[in-house]
Image: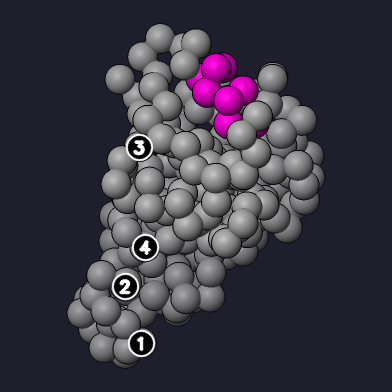
Amino acid sequence: MKRILIADDHETVRSGLRAVLEGRAGWEVVAEAHDGKEAVAEAIERRPDVAIVDYSMPLMTGVEVTRRIREHQLVTEILIFTMHDSNALALQAFQAGARAFLLKSDANKMLLAAVESLIVHKPFYAGAFSSELKRMASGKGAPNQLLSPREKTIVKLVAEGYSNKGVSAILNLSIKTTETHRAAAMRKLNINSTADLVRYAVRAKLVEA
């Protein structure tokens, strides 16, 4: 059974999403949240496979919810659900650790496909911004834009040979925080090993060959 969290401050939206999602065999909505703080708490407690998170919620935006979930190193895949058709917002969502960005106006056509992709840990790109995000995620164009400044610094230090402990000491971070940023960077870049991370850092000119 695949477990799903819905976070939206409108009950009618949550009810509609629940009806659509639970119409799919093997999917279960295990929790709902009406604000960002509750969304984070439910994600930590329930550990769903997928979280559908509205961008505009009380107390915390969907992007901040995503960051908080990633800080807890949950394997939950996150879909940012919004009415705002914005390249900048989509990029911000992916930088925070979301893996899908979907306009509410496209929900009828694309929601199930987006959740299916996330369940198998594949990103989902849709809308006018999809080509740009795909190009960045594939390492073409300007992939560095997918990384936050902190993630780029950590990638650079790892490529220079520092361990997580060494990076943590240099940046005055906890080892857990360093590991979280490093994992987020590797996920965004579709990189699975330190050797690949070093090769990326050289190609991106974060370090010298």
Quarter of the rendering containing residue 151: bottom left
Callout in the foreground (3, 2): 3
Identify the residue at image location x=57%, y=61%.
Answer: 59
Mark 2 secondary-structure assignment: helix
Cβ–Cβ below 8 Å for labels 1 and 2?
yes
Q: In the image, which disc is placed on residue 48?
A: 3
Between the residue at mark 3 and the residue at mark 2, the CA separation in whole angstroms equals 24 Å
Mark in front: 4 vs 3: 3
Q: Main secondary structure of the magenta part?
A: helix
Q: Earlier in the sequence, mark 2 or mark 4?
A: 4
Apparent side of residue 52 relative to residue 158 in the rendered image (left or right): right
Q: Residue at x 31, y 40 (%)?
A: 46
Q: Which residue range is magenta in the image?
A: 13-21
Which of the labelled discs sits on residue 178, or is there none?
2
Q: Does residue 177 appear left or right of residue 68 in this picture?
A: left
Q: Which residue is mark 4?
A: 71
Amino acid marked by disc 1: Leu
Q: Looking at the figure, which quarter contains the N terminus?
A: top left
CB atoms at circles 3 and 1 under 8 Å apart?
no
Q: CA distance from mark 3 to mark 1?
A: 32 Å
Task: Give residue 171's mark.
Answer: 1
Q: CA distance from mark 2 to mark 4?
A: 10 Å
